Image (spheres, rainbow, N blue to C red):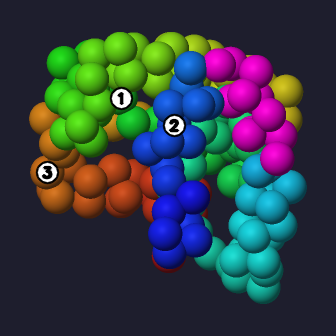
Amino acid sequence: MQTDGTINRKALGEIVFNDKKQLERLDKIMYTPMIVRLGRELYGKSGLILVNAALIAEADLGYLCNNNVVLIGVDKPSQKRRLEGRNLDSEQIQRRLGCQYSYSQKREYLENAIQRDKNGIIFEINNSDGTGLEKIENLFEQVTKELKVK
């Protein structure tokens, strides 16, 4: 805990990214509160709703968005550079990456969920170059067209 009573995320990261059982324990603790909060946020809303959920595949939460997912790819050097920007050393970076699905694993999981649920679309964008506004706007246009959102 930090002096203001909030969680020291860096210290928590050191614990959970060093011990798979601790990460699983944290995921289990956080699952219900996350689902409840998301449900409250979504209640009564309609239309296109964007949810930033980097671990949606790992947490098996694709159903919350009807398996309509924007899958963001990034090359290894860019990914490493971004994590270094968070003041993580090489060992910490490797542990964090080792706890996440790779791009291809996420894609495979999402494809299986779409096939299982008979619903969903994967939209893909590569963000290795920092993705300019025009690229994002084009993807947004594609998403709204495919999902028939006005």
**Left or right position of 86 against 47:** left
C-alpha span from label 2 to label 1 = 23 Å
**Residues drawn in magenta:** 19-29
Amino acid type, mark 3: Gly
Which residue appears at 83% of the width and 40% of the height? Answer: 28
Q: Which mark is residue 60?
A: none
Q: Which residue is mark 3?
A: 132
Q: Position of residue 42 (x, y in %)?
A: 72, 75
Of residue 89 and residue 101, the one placed in the foreground of this image is 89
Above or below, 83 against 120 in this view is: above
Residue that lies at the very extreme toward the bottom in this rendered image: 44
Screen quadrant of the N terminus: bottom right
Above or below, 109 against 52 in this view is: above
Residue that lies at the very extreme toward the front in this rendered image: 3
Based on the displayed image, in which of its 4 quarters is residue 122 positioned? top right
Q: Which residue is mark 1?
A: 73
C-alpha span from label 3 to label 1 = 14 Å
C-alpha span from label 3 to label 2 = 30 Å
Based on the displayed image, in which of its 4 quarters is residue 99 positioned? top right
Q: Is residue 24 magenta?
A: yes
Of residue 46 and residue 74, the one placed in the foreground of this image is 74
Q: Which residue is mark 2?
A: 13
Viewer-nearest of labels 3 and 2?
A: 2
Q: Position of residue 23 (x, y in %)?
A: 69, 30
Residue 78 seen by the camera: yes
**Of helix, strand and loop, which one carries label 3?**
loop
Answer few, some or many: residues within 10 Å of disc 1's Cα (few below 14, many 20 plus, some between 14 and 19): some
Q: Earlier in the sequence, mark 3 or mark 1?
A: 1
Which residue appears at 26% of the width and 59% of the height? Answer: 137
